[in-house]
Image (spheres, rainbow, N blue to C red):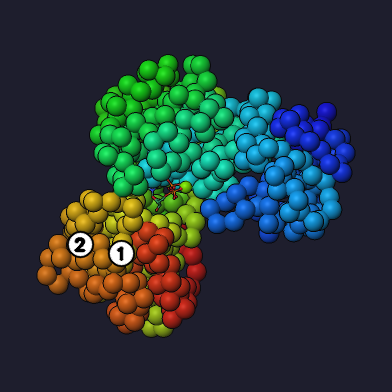
Amino acid sequence: MVDALWTIGELVEATGGELRCATPAAPIHGISIDSRTVTSGEAFFAIRGDRFDGHEFVDAALTARAGLAVVAADKLDTITGKGPLLVVPDVLGALEDVARAARARSKARIVAVTGSVGKTSTKEALRIALSPSGPTHASAASFNNHWGVPLSLARLDRDMPYAVFEIGMNHPGEITPLVAMVRPHAAIVTTVEAVHIEYFKSVEEIADAKAEIFTGLVPGGHAIINRDNPHYERLRRAAKKAGATIVSFGESRGAKARLEKVALNPACSCVSAKILGHPVTYKLGAPGKHLVMNSLAVLAAAEVLGADLALAALSLQRLEQPAGRGRRSMLDLRGGRATLIDESYNANPASMRAALALLGQSAPSGKGRRIAVMGDMLELGEQSDALHAALASDVAKAGVDLVFASGPHMRALADALPPGRLARHADRSDGLRSALLDAVSDGDVIMIKGSNGSRMAPLVEALCERYPPMQAEPAE
Ligand SMILES: Nc1ncnc2c1ncn2[C@@H]1O[C@H](COP(=O)(O)OP(=O)(O)OP(=O)(O)O)[C@@H](O)[C@H]1O
Ligand SMILES: [Mg+2]
């Protein structure tokens, strides 16, 4: 019985590589592709990233006492450090080989998650929901692409009973090879929206690309699909074609995991639902209707994977919102206080609407106002300005009093707002800084969101610097 994640011998067998200066029986405790975080006894895979080639860091990894460095044969002469090496023709290919070997030896019940938004939120909720039924492995961060998925699989311990993998894509055809490695028992498509639309001809094409996830299901696997989404029928047909058992979720009649009642509070939600015939009532530890909808998919997955549904539902009160994805704090205005909702991590039309709804759900106190600080949503192609302008109705629905907007596309929203609603538009986010800092007053609720490239996080930092957060708002 081997305790370690891998032995070096197993990695040799999986990759067919050639070993130098290493003992096959030696244990490997982790898989890394980052020499800055690699720790003693881990295997460092020198893959080529977006900006760097891992081979430049093999010496650093060996100095950090990596248990093994996996390197390409044609790069061998660039490595000067001494240490155990596994030489392969192609390092990413070797990582995929190890991923497949991890899957082949695993008895885990596996769920894969894709969707235009909500992949990481849903993956983290699954991690929490499955854990009471047994140790649960889950992808780190948003590791969902051509290296993130094999890396996450290669890290799967041999005895793990449950595993959750996030799978993403920017182009058609990307999910198929990734899900073929994961071979999940259940596959969730959270939702289909106009995200990364510049790489697609239509939203239907996005739906088809998401539906690729069903092609990797094990025979008899479950496809967990959003029944409220306009593309439900398209996804259902694709899942059927792949031989999957369909489990729909949502508010719509006929959804197999159906929302029955919900109370949306500023810091949490209370939900009654029927999951494949089982009534459950539970509290979600983070607010927002969008997370409620994701939770239906999470519980449906828990049920079809054979986990304890009641414990899964109970555990969801531990759900949290990480920085940049809806984390709330109370700002000390010295002589007043304001609530900050930090959504600065990223944005697309779906998550922007969800964040505006969340702002609408949060009542200002006294003379306070709802303030939305919005930066450009990127990668929306030709429809970009129209998609920005269309948010005007969501701004109105949420009862937003003031909008600070930045970026060229947000100009379209600024122009679509009724008179008096726009506080300021600037070409770049730092152009909003001083006006925003001066505008904040007692009782306000401020929500900040934009695509990563729109640099909204510095505005969150500026607010927190001027008005230091008092405490995390207590969950209700
Ligand atoms: N079902 C949903 N509908 C709309 N917005 C959602 C939904 N689920 C989560 N969100 C919001 O979308 C944003 C991104 O969420 P998350 O990080 O889970 O998405 P992701 O799909 O993993 O994104 P990425 O492509 O960056 O990995 C967050 O602000 C989150 O609150
Ligand atoms: Mg993600």
Residue closest to the eye, 113 or 382: 382
* Left or right: 199 in relation to 470: left
Instruction: State whether residue 433 appears in this view.
Output: yes
Q: Give residue 427's position: percent from left, percent from top.
A: 28, 72
* Rendered image quadrant of residue 119: top left
- The disc label shown at residue 374, or none: 1
Q: Give residue 244's position: percent from left, percent from top.
A: 43, 19
Q: Give residue 15's position: percent from left, percent from top.
A: 71, 32
- The disc label shown at residue 85, or none: none
* Left or right: 220 in relation to 341: right
Instruction: State whether residue 310 appears in this view.
Output: no
What is the quadrant of the C terminus in the image?
bottom left
Q: Residue under label 2, please give it.
A: 413
Q: Label 1 is placed on what type of residue?
A: Met
* Rendered image quadrant of residue 431: bottom left
Q: Residue at x 51, y 16 (%)?
A: 219
What is the quadrant of the N terminus in the image?
top right
Q: Label 2 is placed on what type of residue?
A: Leu
Q: Residue at x 60, y 49 (%)?
A: 48
* Left or right: 464 in relation to 65: left
The verdict on label 2 being within 8 Å of ligand 1 is no
Gap in Å between the C-alphas at discs 2 and 1? 10 Å
Q: Residue at x 39, y 67 (%)?
A: 456
- 60 over 117 or under it: above or below: below
Residue closest to the eye, 298 or 448: 448
Mark sitting earlier along the chain (2/1): 1
